[in-house]
Image (spheres, grey):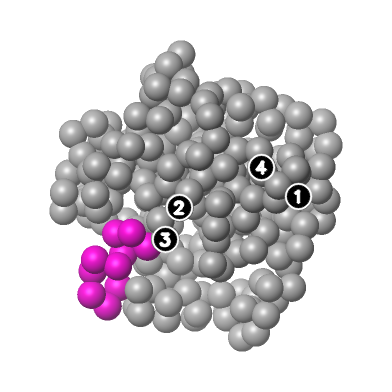
Amino acid sequence: MRLAVCILHYGSAAMTGAIHRQFLEGDPLCAQDVHVLDNNAPQGYSGAFERLCENRFWGGAFEYAAELFADKGYTHLWFCNNDCLFLSPPPYMARAKARLCQLEKKGRVGLYSPSASANPYHAQMVTLPGAQCARVRYIDGIAPIISLDCLKDIGGFDLGENPFGYGVDVWLSYRAAQAGWGVWVDHALVLRHAYHAAAKEKPGFLDAAALAENAYLSERLGRDWRNRLRGMQQALEVV
């Protein structure tokens, strides 16, 4: 397994720096595998390995990073929002790799994510005290690890007419689960996520993104997609 970390920078450079430092200090032997991608942010990040020439939003940037790191020979990509911070102690990459190897004994793993201390949208992402992992039907894309073989197997990203990317994480992980890949939430590795930290600063962005998400998921999951997702938020297996 070769795991690359890609932190997507947009908004606060201080916020990006906090999770970047956590990875570098928590997994010093893997520092060469930790990268920051500047998504053409108004406030640049000096530690970024690349600055995109335009804001590709979450979905487009994830697609770009997946192609880039696959070409570099990585097998897995940990794509992290910059408004996340680990609450669990380090190491992070080593713990995630060990967990993935453990879960692979149960079957191929397509996507995996740390749990979150709170999540107002997707209840299956909230940390379950005493649990180790839970297999779920889809995940929130705050910090997913994706198998690049899984991504290839399901036909890559389906961004559609949704430039903002909201809902792409749901559809991506749902497709993986439907194709027989395990989708897991790790309840022993916990994040705090500041929802929409950068998006809130741009007037009208969240409204436009919500409209695009509704059209995107309505086309793929039906007009009652919100109820469908709520029905899918119970775990299939808790270990």
Residue position for label 3: 195
* Callout 4 touching callout 3 (CB < 8 Å): no
Precedes in sequence: disc 3 or disc 1: 1
> Mark 4 packing: few (<14 Cα in 10 Å), some, or many (20+)?
many
Magenta part of the protein: which range? 196-205
Q: Secondary structure at mark 4?
A: strand
Name the residue: 64% across, 63% down: 123
- In the rendered image, is residue 184 in sight? no
Q: CA distance from mark 4 to mark 1?
A: 9 Å
Q: Main secondary structure of the magenta part?
A: loop
Residue 135 is marked as: 1
* Callout 3 touching callout 1 (CB < 8 Å): no
Q: Secondary structure at mark 1?
A: strand
Residue 51 at x, y percent in the picture: 22, 41
* Callout 3 touching callout 2 (CB < 8 Å): yes
Horizontal relation, residue 150 to residue 201: left or right: right
* Callout 4 touching callout 2 (CB < 8 Å): no
Q: CA distance from mark 3 to mark 2?
A: 6 Å
Horizontal relation, residue 131 to residue 56: left or right: right
